[in-house]
Image (spheres, rainbow, N blue to C red):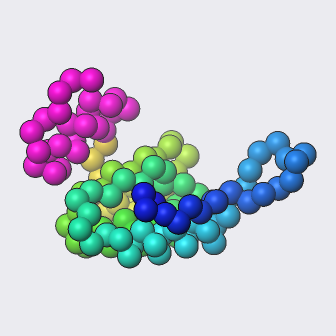
Amino acid sequence: LPAGPDLRISQTLGAGARGCRLDGAVVEQAAVLATGRLDGAALLIVNKFGKLEAAGRGFVPVIAAALDRGLPVLVGVNALNLPAFLDFAGGMAQELPPDAAAVSDWAAAALRLPAPAPL
């Protein structure tokens, strides 16, 4: 969150670890904090609809709260979690190409701003 606190969403597995493991409890703590900061927001960006969200947890309540408030929501989704996301979205999702200009144009339109200058 821009104004903090800093939350470590991966578990510390030790010096010999070759990867990381998501700490679902911390992700859900971040979601609660984000939901509490939706007042005054113009747009919600969720960088990943992941395993937790596919299970109906994680940032799902934040996305739902933002939509209930009429906020546009931009969500990153990988192919693995796309079916769960589409089910969650219930036909409300609009697919964007993986292109910065397309995302900027979508955000400008969602916020009713003039189109940004080309990148």
Q: Where is residue 80 in the image (x, y as percent from the top left)?
A: 55, 46
**Residue at coordinates 50% horizontally, 43% vertically from top-left?**
78
**Residue at coordinates 68% horizontally, 57% vertically from top-left?**
10
Q: What residue span does the magenta drawing correspond to?
A: 96-119
Tell me the quarter of the image containing the C terminus: top left
In the depicted structure, whether residue 1 falls above or below residue 34: above
Q: Is residue 55 among what the camera can see?
A: no
Residue furthest to the right in view is: 16
The one of 65 and 113 positioned closer to us in this rendering: 113
Left or right, 46 with respect to 57, comes to left
In the depicted structure, whether residue 114 falls above or below residue 50: above
In the depicted structure, whether residue 8 falls above or below residue 112: below
Asked whether residue 49 is drawn in magenta, I would say no
What number of labels is visible? 0
Q: Position of residue 15 (x, y in %)?
A: 88, 48
Residue furthest to the front in view is: 3
Tell me the quarter of the image containing the N terminus: bottom left
Residue furthest to the top in view is: 119
The one of 14 and 49 positioned closer to us in this rendering: 14
The one of 77 and 103 positioned closer to us in this rendering: 103
Q: Where is residue 8 in the image (x, y as percent from the top left)?
A: 64, 60
Asked whether residue 118 is drawn in magenta, I would say yes
**Residue at coordinates 56% horizontally, 61% vertically from top-left?**
6
